[in-house]
Amino acid sequence: MTNGEKLHTISALVEDKPGVLTRVAGLFAARGFNIDSLAVGPTETPGLSRMTIVVNVETKPLEQVTKQLNKLINVIKILEHDPGTSVERELMLVKVRAAGEDRQRILEIASVFRVNVVDVTHHTITLEAAGKPEKLEALLELVADFGIVELSRTGRIALSRGDRGIRDRVLRAARTAGGEGA
Amino acid sequence: MTTLTGARALLKALELEGVEVIFGIPGGASMPIYDPLVDESPIRHILCRHEQGAGHAAEGYAWATGRPGVCMATSGPGGTNLVTPLADAKMDSVPIVAITGQVPTPVVGNDAFQEADITGITMPITKHNFLVKDPAEIVRTVREAFHIATTGRPGPVLIDLPKDVLLAETEWSWPERVSLPGYRPTTKGNQRQVVEAVKMILASERPVLYVGGGVIKANASEELYRLATLGRLPVVTTLMARGAFPDSHELCLGMPGMHGSYTAVTAMQRADLLVALGARFDDRVTGKLAAFAPHARVIHVDIDPAEIGKNRAADVPIVGDCRDVIAKMVAELERRQGEAGPPDRSAWLAQLREWQQRFPFRYDQRPDGPLKPQYAVERLRALADDDTIVVAGVGQHQMYASQFWRFEKPRHWINSGGLGTMGFAVPAALGAKVGRPDARVVAIDGDGCFQMTAQELATSTTEKIPFVCAILNNGYLGMVRQWQELFFDQRYSGVYLDPNVPDYVKLAEAYGAVGIRVERPDEVDAAIEKAYSITDRSVVIDFRIDPSEGVFPMVPAGASNDDIILGPEAIRPTSDPEEAPIA
C-alpha cells in the first residue's frame, strides 16, 4: 500500500450492545479521524465483539484516537497492532469480466494467487481471495485490466502473534500517560 | 419480592441515589413518571417553562453543590430541547442525569407522534447514554448513569425510557455494586511522576500554576492553597476555575486567556514551568498554540488521559484526580523543601507584582458619564457577601463578571465556558438557588442572553426560588458588536437589539418579579441594596450601560498571547506611546 505509513491497525474489544458501532463510528467522525476500514464480529467471549479498525493518522495522532476510543464506556480494550508481530488478513470477492480468451488468463492468475473461483457465467468470473492486504491489492491490479464488474471487501482483521490475547495486553497510550493501572 | 411499575422503580432508584429535586416538563411519554410524584415520591419536581431551562437548572444545581443535577423531559421535542444543556454539560464536565420519555417500544422507529431518536442525537454530547427496553434494567441503569456522571471526568448521562417500559411491572432489586468493565477511571496519581513533577517545580525559576475547572470538580481547593503557599507558586485561575484560589491572595494573578489579565497572560508566556492542574489548554487560554508559553516545560495533571498531550505535549504527565495528585505533590514538596522553604524566586514574583500594578483591569466611570458595566459589577460585588454565588451567561457581561468580581471560594462562580451557551444564566441561577437556598444568587446577564431563557422567571416566581438578575443592557449582542468594531471595520450587522425592547422592568413585573431600572452611576448602589434586601421574589435590575464599552485586555482570536491588546486606544489611533499595544 502506497500510504502504508499513515495506516495503523487497531483492535477494539467492545461490549456487544446496541449502538456500539454508532458510538465508535460517530466518535471517528466527530473527532476528524479517518477510518480506512472497519470490521466487526463476535469473539471467544459471549457478549463481547471485536472491531478491527484501520485508521488513517495523517491528520490526527494515533494516540488521540486510542485515548478517545478508550473513553467510550462500551469499549473494554484497545490494542494497536505492530505490523511485524501481527497477522493481518482480509477477504475479498471480485467479479471480473471474462469474455473469450480472457477467461483462461484470469483462471491462470487465480491459480498463481491460489484464490478460489466461486462463480462463473458466460461473461464473468467471480474470485474469492483471502490474505494479506498487499496480496489482495496485487491481485486487483492484475484483474483490473479485464474490467471489474463489482467488488466487495470485508476490511482488515488482525490478531497479534504469540501466546497472549488482547485481554492480556496493556494499551501503549495508557502506559505512557503516567497513571497507575490502566 | 416487591413488584412495581418501571416508573415507580425509576423514582425509587433516584431517591436512593440521593436525588432531592428534578427539573422538568412532562409530556405524553413521560406521564407514568409524574403520577407517583403526586404523593409517593419525596422528590421535588420543579416545573420549568422550557426543557432547555430544566437542563441548565440541573447544571446550575450541580455547579453549586457538586452533586449531580437531574432534569426530565418527554419524548421528541422534549428531548431535543435538552440538546443544548447536554452539550454544555459535556464541554464543561458538569455531572447531570437527563431522563427522557420515549414512545412505546412497539412503535420505536415508526415515526410515531413525538418520536425522536434521542440516544442517537445525544451520543456525541453525552458522556454516555442508555435506551432501556426492559423494566428490569431500569434500576441498574440509574445506578450506572449516576456512577458514570459523577466519577472520572464528570459529564452528562441520558436515560431514555419508552412509555411501555415505564408502565410495565417489574421486581424491585437494588444492585449493591456497579460493574462496568469498560469504565475504570484512573484516580490515583502515579507517585514516581509526582516526584518528577516536584523536582521540576523546585528547579524552576518562573513557575506558574495553571489551574482549571478540574480543581473545582475534584474539590481540591484546600490542597491547591497548600501547594501554592508552601511553594510560593503564583496561580492563574481559568474561566472554569474562578474561585478555586482566592483572588485576594498575593499569589493570585487572576484569569488568563483571551480576556484575561495582562499579568496572568504574560506570566504564562514568560514562565519556564507550567503546572496545569485540571486544565485542558483550551484555545481561549492559549491563543495561537504554537506561540503559547514558548519557554515553559509542562507538568499536566488531569483525570482524563485524552486531555494530556492533546494540545500541548507534557514533560511530566500525571493521570489522576486533582485532589489526590495535588495532595501528593504537597507531601513531596514538604519533604524535599524541608526547613529551607521554597527556592528564591523573588525576581519573578517582583516582576509579576510590577505587571499587576502597571496593568490592572481598568475602566473609566465618570460621575456624570454613561454607566459602565464594570462599575455595576464592582458594586454588585462590593455590596455582596463572600458566600454570594454569581452566575453568568456568555459574552461581554460574562467577561466583566469574571474580571471584576472578586472570587474567594470555589463553587461560587457558575457560567458556560466551553460551549459558550447564551441564555445559560437565568435557569442556571434558578438551579443554583435550589441547591444552595441559604446563599444569595446573582445572575449577571446580558440583554441578548436574558431574552433567550427569561421564561424561567415564571418558574422562579411560582416555585418561590428567588435570585437577583442584573442585566447589563447595552441594546446589543455586545461581544459580536465588539468584534465587528475591531475586526470588521465598524460595520455593524445583525447585532442591534434595542435596549427598550422589551421593557425589562415591565417584563419582570409581568413574571411576578421586581423590576428596577438604573440609568446613571449614582443610582447603582441604591438599586443593588434594594435588590439584595428583597428575598421573597426575584429581582431584575436593568442596568442601562454604555454600548460603546468593550472588553479588554484582548488577545484577538488566533493571535499570539504576546500580542495582547490592553485597551481600545491601542486599536484606534493614539498619540500616547504608553498606550500602544504591548508587542
Image: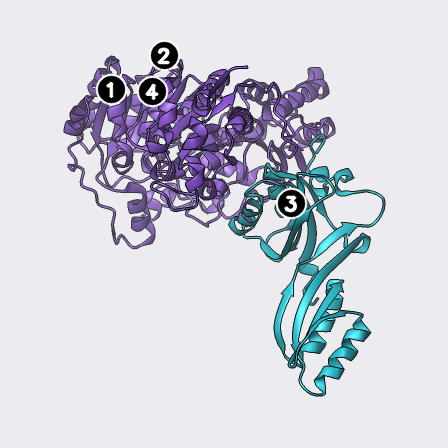
Chain colours: A cyan, B purple
Residue B198 vertical position relative to residue A142 in the rendered view, above or below: above
Label 3 neighbour load within 10 Å: few <14, some 14-19, many 20+: many
- Chain bearing mark 4: B
Residue on which disc 4 sits: B441
Q: Is residue B521 left or right of residue B96?
A: left
Q: Nearer the viewer, mark 1 or mark 3?
A: 1
Task: Give the mark toward the camera: 4 or 3.
Answer: 3
Question: How much space separates mark 1 and mark 3, taking CA atoms?
Answer: 49 Å
Residue appearing at x 37%, y 29% in the figure:
B30
Please give the residue where the numbered disc 2 appears in the rendered image: B438
Of marks 1 and 2, which one's residue comes earlier in the chain?
2
Estimate the x, y position of residue B272 in percent, counting from the top left: 61, 37
Q: Which residue is mark 3?
A: A66
Closer-to-camera residue (B494/B156): B156
Tag 2, which secondary structure?
A: loop
User: Is residue B538 visible from the viewing direction of this image?
Assistant: no
Tag 4's secondary structure? Answer: strand
Which amino acid type corresponds to the residue marked 2 in the rendered image?
Asp
Q: Residue B162 — which label?
A: none
Q: Which residue is mark 1?
A: B462
Is the residue marked by circle 2 packed among few (<14), some (14-19), or many (20+) residues within 10 Å? few
The chain ID associated with circle 2 is B
Q: Give the amino acid at mark 1.
A: Thr
In 3D space, how far apart are the residues under numbered discs 4 and 3 (Cα atoms)? 42 Å
Residue B169 seen:
yes
Location of residue A17 by image quarter: top right
Question: Residue at coordinates 63% horizontally, 65% vertically from top-left?
Answer: A152
Which mark is first along the chain, 1 or 4?
A: 4
Locate residue B45, reporting x and y percent: 35, 20
| Residue density around tag 1, few if under 14, some if 14–19, many if 20 or more, within 10 Å | some
Q: Nearer the viewer, mark 4 or mark 1?
A: 1
Q: Give the alpha-carbon distance from disc 2 to disc 3, as whole Å.
A: 45 Å
